[in-house]
Image (spheres, rainbow, N blue to C red):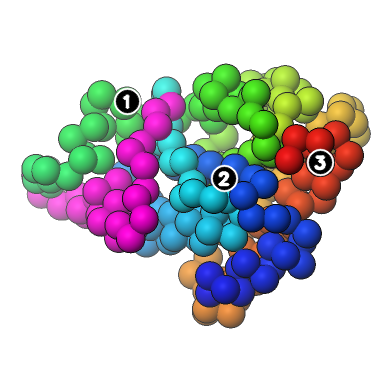
Amino acid sequence: MAILMRLAARVSRLRKGRSKVVLVLCGGYRGPFEGERVRRTVRRAVRIADALDSRPPDVWIYGADCHRLPAIKSGSLEAWIADWAVLARSPVFGTSKEIGNPLACSAEQYGLFKGASVAEAMKILRTEYGSSRVPVLVLFHVESMEGDDSGVAGELEKTSGKPLFWQFLAQLDGMHPSVLNCLDDVRRERPSITNTHYNNSWDMDTSVGMDTFMQYGMIKPYARWAREPRRRKLG
């Protein structure tokens, strides 16, 4: 799959080492960490980074605040996932004992599993990567947008001239549309906002071939944006 992903990057005219890949995990809720969703997200992001970046992705996690997680070291992906992308299922009776699990041990310090603010995380990432010398693909996992629409729209406007591309990954409630469901309207009102895309199929469990196709779909909007003249100057 890694070879196919690198081929997809070349087809998109993206040269390895000319992009920065950042993965942002939603830490507002335990559930996604108790199943396959988060670990699948991490593996896909690592394959994308392998095709575009010279290093594994930077990984952040956000609840009310946003924190950078330890680096994924070469050859240690599964150990990293066990530490930072997996939680034991909550028992029906009592509470789970997760002594030694770094994610569980950091929950209180990082303010996790009590809801999350997408806009606040975007603000921190804007500060961290807004002056990057290369375009930055931010794979931003979202579980909820409740109360965040105006803040997210404001951050999109503030980053419209910066080297940041927000690739939002979510399966949100279609009965309550968010600003992510209305990005065409956002762009009509603010034509300068070209640096964002929303994908609602990222969480799907797929076959090997379809998984590569899905990841190719992740980088196509970024590739179009990164090839804009002012972005090419960065690389």
Of the residues shown, which amino acid type is indicated by label 2? Val
Q: Position of residue 136 (x, y in %)?
A: 64, 39
Give the camera-side residue of 125 and 17. 17
Q: Earlier in the sequence, mark 2 or mark 1?
A: 2
Q: Are marks 2 and 1 in contact (CB under 8 Å)?
A: no
Q: Residue at x 30, y 46 (%)?
A: 84
Q: Which mark is residue 232?
A: 3
Q: Earlier in the sequence, mark 1 or mark 3?
A: 1
Name the residue beneath numbered marker 1.
111
**Would residue 179 be visible to someone looking at this image?**
no
Q: Position of residue 197 (x, y in %)?
A: 72, 45
Spatial CA distance of label 2 from label 1 is: 24 Å
Name the residue beneath numbered marker 2.
21
Q: Residue at x 64, y 29 (%)?
A: 132
The answer to whether 190 is drawn above or below residue 19 in the figure is: above
The magenta stretch is 66-94
Q: Secondary structure beneath disc 1?
A: loop
- Relative placement, left or right, of 224 versus 45 is right
Q: Secondary structure beneath disc 3?
A: helix
Q: Position of residue 231 (x, y in %)?
A: 80, 37
